[in-house]
Amino acid sequence: MNMRNIVRTVLPLLLAAAILVWMYRGLDWAMLAAAVTGEMRWEWMLLSLPFGIAAQVLRALRWRQLLLPLGERPRLTTSVNAIYLSYASSLVVPRVGEVLRCGVLSRYDGCNFSRSLGTVVTERVVDMLVVLVLTAVTFLLQVPLFVNFFTRTGVSLSGFLAQFTSMGWVVTAVCAIVVVLTMWLLARRFHLLTRASSAASDLMQGLLSLRHVRHQWLFWLYSVGIWAAYYLHFYLTFFCFDTTAALAPMAALVAFVIGTFAVLVPTPNGAGPWHFAVKTVLMLYGVASDMGAMFVLIVHTVQTALVALLGLWASAALALTPRRTTSAASGDEALCQQTFT
């Protein structure tokens, strides 16, 4: 592993660790253990897990729909396992999963790597549009509630922001800088890939694949379904504790939207920035700081464990999957290896 890969792996881990250590430096771990073993209603946590799986399966179905007009026909099982593995691998190296899943389809189903990568970019653009619409709707619906909350409680927005410590503002600023830097690096890598690779036309085909998708209504239904499943995966965990169970679904939606943006910071599964962002939203709705910190720690840990288990499942399943190799696929595997280094 060269120095660049070491930095790409270690820095996100250090950032996540620094934020988590700062957040939980004064946590009463005995209280956390008591909550997990006694107070917590685990049936709601278990009920939320199928929605996390459903979101990834729907993503695989949508991705396959983008690939079909390009003449690529990956097996559904391979596509699902590629998604599982991509999320699990990103726990180790953030964002590497997007490239890895294209390599899986190339290796096992002979799909063109460059076209697959283009469809992944298209997917991300669609996801961004869905999230932006969701954010706008959430904000418009919640403005009156925020005003009413501040009026009834006598808390001003400036007073709430004053609860931020100087370190809290530092964490927010660092996360914002890291997001901007990551976006710049991704844009630069994509630009270099399209210039240096002879597969630039294949990439463009993948990017424009949405135009030729059959049953556009189904594609957008999948897109909405993905984010609805993610929301339910998160919202159902609110019922694990009395404090969060009392919150309205819209409060969970606000926390979900803010957490979605926090995950843009390239740490493993958003660890650190996600905790900080969601805890801050919960405090806005009156959840005590310690309770909010415990809630996000438990939820994130369980959901990350689910992602890791699905990745292990995918690794075992792919090891037993017969390959449909082609000469084109072999060339794509070489391109895949180049993008990792």
Image (cartoon, helix red, strand yellow):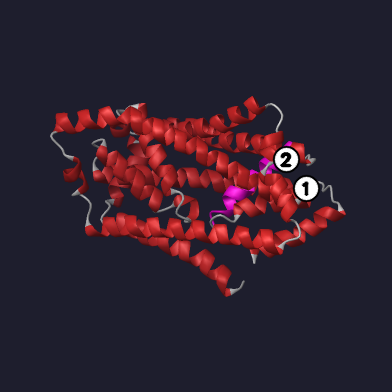
Q: Amino acid at mark 2?
A: Leu
Q: How many marks?
A: 2
169 vs 125: above or below: below
Q: Do the residues bearing badges 2 and 1 touch, measured as CB atoms within 8 Å?
A: yes
Question: For the stretch drawn in magenta, what is the main secondary structure?
Answer: helix
Give the quarter of the figure containing the N terminus.
bottom right
**Residue 100 is at least partly visible in this image:** yes
Viewer-nearest residue: 274 or 288:
274
Q: Is residue 325 left or right of residue 135?
A: right
Q: Secondary structure at mark 1?
A: loop
Cα distance, mark 2 to mark 1? 9 Å
User: x, y percentage for residue 145?
Assistant: 26, 28
Residue 80 in magenta stretch = yes
In percent of the image, x 37 and y 27: which residue is there?
Answer: 249
Q: Which residue is mark 1?
A: 111
The quarter of the displayed image where residue 148 is located: top left
Mark 2 residue crowding within 10 angstroms, few (<14) / some (14–19) / many (20+): many
In percent of the image, x 66 and y 37: which residue is there?
Answer: 210
Mark 1 residue crowding within 10 angstroms, few (<14) / some (14–19) / many (20+): many
**Residue 75 is at least partly visible in this image:** no
Q: Earlier in the sequence, mark 2 or mark 1?
A: 2
| Residue 67 numbered tag | 2
Q: Is residue 293 left or right of residue 51?
A: left
146 vs 304: above or below: above
In percent of the image, x 30 and y 39: which residue is there?
Answer: 282
Q: Amino acid at mark 1?
A: Cys
Viewer-nearest residue: 218 or 17:
218
Q: Is residue 40 left or right of residue 285?
A: right
Viewer-nearest residue: 292 or 47:
292
Start and end of the magenta stretch? 75-93
